[in-house]
Amino acid sequence: MNRKKTLFLILTLLFFVVPLTALLLQSFSAPWRFHTGQGIDWGWQGYSILFGNPQLWEATFISIGIGFAVLFINAAIGLFTGKALASYAYRGKAWLEALLLSPILIPSLAIAMGLHLFMIRIGLADTIWGVMLIHLVPTVPYSIKIFHNSYQQMGKAMMEQPHILGAGFWTQVFTVELPLLRPAIRSLTFLTIVISLSQYALTAIIGGGRVVTLPLVFFPFLDNANTSIMAAFSIWFALIPIFMYIIIEALMMFLPYSRLPWRNHR
C-alpha cells in the first residue's frame, strides 16, 4: 500500500506538479532561452498583454455561459437516458446503446459540417444557441455513459424502494437518486466543461466568428511564439473549469442529506 502511495506521489509530482509549476513561473517571466546564458527576467508582460485584449472578458463570460448551458442540458439528457437504459430490458437495447455512443466514433467536424447547412436553414447558425447545440455532440455520449454506469451500480432494487414506499417520480429523483449520483455529477461537470471550453473548430464553424469564445481568442496568440503570453493564457484558461466546478459543488450542497456547514456540525 505504501509502495503504491509513493508511486502515486512520484507520478503526480512528475506529470502534474512540476509542469504546472513551470507553467506558472513562465507566466510571470519574460521568454527565456536556456542556451543564451541570460537570467530570468520576472515581470507581468504576459498578463498585461492578456488582459489588454478587448475580447478577453466577453469571450470568458460567453464561454462560461455556454459551458453551464451545455452542462445542464447534458445532465438532463444523461440522467433520464442513463436511467432508462439501466432500468428496462428490451429487444435492440444493445443497438440503441451503440447508436447513442456513435458520435464519439464519428469525427465531430464531419457532423458539424453536415449540421451547418441544417442550422443555416432553421436560423441557428452564427448564434449562441447553435453553438450550445453543437457542443452537445461530443459531450452527450459521455453523459449517457456516466449516468448509465452509475444507475447500474446503484441497482434496480434501490430505485424500486422509494416507489414502493409511495414517493412520486420527482421526489424520488431529488431525494434519492441525485444525492446518490454526486460522484457521477462531479465527473460529468469536469468532463463536459473541459470539452465544451476546448472546442475551437466546432465553435468557429457554427458560430461563424460572431460567437467569440476563449479558444477563438487564444488561437491567434499561437503565431507569436511568446511563451509568457501562452503560459498566462493557459493559466487563465485552466481557472475557468475550476471556478465552474466550485459553483456546481456549492449547488450540490443544497441536495437532500448534504452536510451544510452552517447547519450540520457533525
Image (cartoon, rainbow, N blue to C red):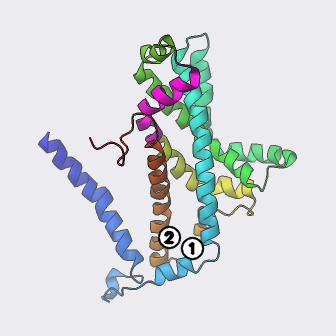
Classify 201 as above or below 104: below
Q: Secondary structure at mark 1?
A: helix
**Residue 16 in the image, given as x and y percentages of width and height:** 32, 58
- What is the residue that sits farthest to the left in this orientation? 2
Secondary element at tag 2: helix
Chief secondary structure of the magenta span?
helix
**Residue drawn at point x = 62 percent, y = 55 percent:** 65
Q: Is 249 situated above or below 75? A: below
- On the image, numbered disc 2 is attached to which residue? 233
Q: Residue at x 80, y 49 (%)?
A: 124
Residue 192 counted in the magenta span = no
- Tell me the number on the disc at residue 221: 1
The location of residue 4, given as percent across then percent down, is: 18, 42
Marks 1 & 2, CB-CB < 8 Å contact: yes
**x and y percentages locating residue 160 in the rendered image:** 48, 14
Res. 139 mark: none
Looking at the image, how many numbered discs can be counted on the residues?
2
Quarter holding the N terminus is top left
Residue at 36% x, 85% y is 42
Please give the range of residues in magenta.
Answer: 167-187
